[in-house]
Image (cartoon, grey):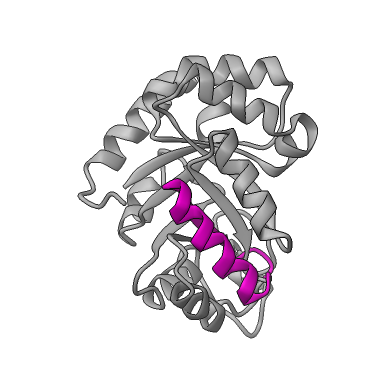
Amino acid sequence: MQLQLTFDHGKRHELIDAIDRYAGSVDIVEIGYPELVTFGLDLVSELHGQHPDLKLCVDAKVFHGGTGITRRCFEAGAHIVTVLAAAPDPVISQMVRHAHEYGGKIMCDMDGYKRPGTRTAEVDGLGVDYVSIASGYLMEHEYDLHKPQRRSLFQLRPLDLAGAVKRNLIHAGLAIGTGINETNIRDVMQLDPAIVMVGRGILATDDPAATARRLKEIAEASPRER
C-alpha cells in the first residue's frame, strides 16, 4: 500500500516547502486540481526537477482531450494522471495507451457517481491502473454517508461504498481518500487499497512530518504495492 499526500490549496512556495520537508515520508505527492489550475504544469516540472525519484500524481480530472493533456502531464514529470469516470470510454482508452508510452499510470476518479458499481467495472476493463473513491468519512459527496441516519434509503457506513467498488475491480488497484488519518487508517487497510490518499490528516496536524512517517509505517505494513 502506498501513501499519497494530497495538496488542493495553498500558495506555491508553501506547497514546494512542504514537499521538500515531507517527500521522504510519503510515496506519492498529488498536485490537486486547484493547484494545477492556479500554477499550471510548470509547477509539476519544477517539483519533478527537485525530486526526480518522487512519484507525482497530477489531478488533471480529464474529461475530454485526453491525448494532448495526458502527454503534456507526463512530459512535465507526472507519474499518475487522473481522468473522470464520466469521461467517454474512448478518452479513457486513449489516456491508458499514452500512459503506457510514457511508463505512467492512469487513475480514474469516481467522484460524482451515485451508483459507481457498474462504471467501476467498465473503467477497470478499459485498463486504468487505479480507481479512486471517497472513504465516506467526510460529507463532501452525496454518497459519503458519515451519518447514515440522515438517509432513509441507504444505511451505508463509511467505507461501505469503497468496499463495493473494490469488489468490482479485477485489474485496477483501489485508491481511497478524504478524511483519512491516524485514527481510521487501519480500518481503511482492511480493504487492501493500493493507495491511501491523505491531505489534512497530515497537513493539519501539529507535526506533519512525524504524522506522515507514522502513516507510511502503517501503510508499509500492508503487503500490497502497485
Depicted 172 relative to depicted 70: above or below: below
188 sits left or right of 205 in the view = left
- In the image, residue 38 above or below residue 207: below
- The answer to whether any part of residue 180 appears in the image is yes
The residue located at (58%, 14%) in the rendering is 17
Q: In the rendering, at what x and y percent does residue 218 appear?
A: 28, 39
Q: Position of residue 183 (x, y in %)?
A: 41, 42
- Residue 207 in sight from this viewpoint: no
Residue at screen point 37% across, 76% down:
167
Residue 200 against residue 184 in the figure, above or below: above
Q: Decide if residue 165 is on the left or right side of residue 85.
A: left
Name the residue nearer the viewer: 116 or 130.
Answer: 130
Q: Residue at x 53, y 84 (%)?
A: 118
Please tell me which residue lies in front, 77 or 171: 77
The residue lying at 49 percent from left, 74 percent from top is: 126
Magenta residues, as a range? 87-112
